[in-house]
Image: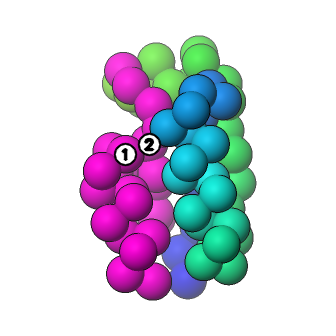
Amino acid sequence: MEQVVVYSTGCPRCKILEKKLTEKGISFTENNSVEEMLELGIMEVPVLQIGGERLNFSQAVQWANNQ
């Protein structure tokens, strides 16, 4: 599986996504660097990055549900 990164600030939606990934047994790295998020153009969280693809919250939950 490609590297999975959750860009998160610890917000409620971030915690929901992280819980979903954990329940599905999906290993991920959490990145909470606001500076890095801004450099990447991430303006809302959570963002799930799988390899080079970035998914917003709704897309990320759907992706996790399909795993």
Residue corresponding to mark 1: 57
Span of residues in magenta: 43-67
Local SS, label 2:
strand
- Residue 10 against residue 35 in the figure, above or below: below
Q: Quadrant of the C terminus?
A: bottom left
Q: Is residue 6 left or right of residue 28?
A: left
Say which residue appears at 62% left-offset and 42% top-offset. 15
Q: Amino acid at mark 1?
A: Phe
Numbered label attached to residue 47? 2
Callouts 1 and 2 close, C-beta under 8 Å: yes
Q: Position of residue 56 (x, y in %)?
A: 33, 45
Camera-side residue: 40 or 62? 62
Say which residue appears at 66% left-offset and 30% top-offset. 10
Q: Position of residue 9 (x, y in %)?
A: 62, 26
Q: Amino acid at mark 2?
A: Val
- Residue 37 against residue 35 in the figure, above or below: below
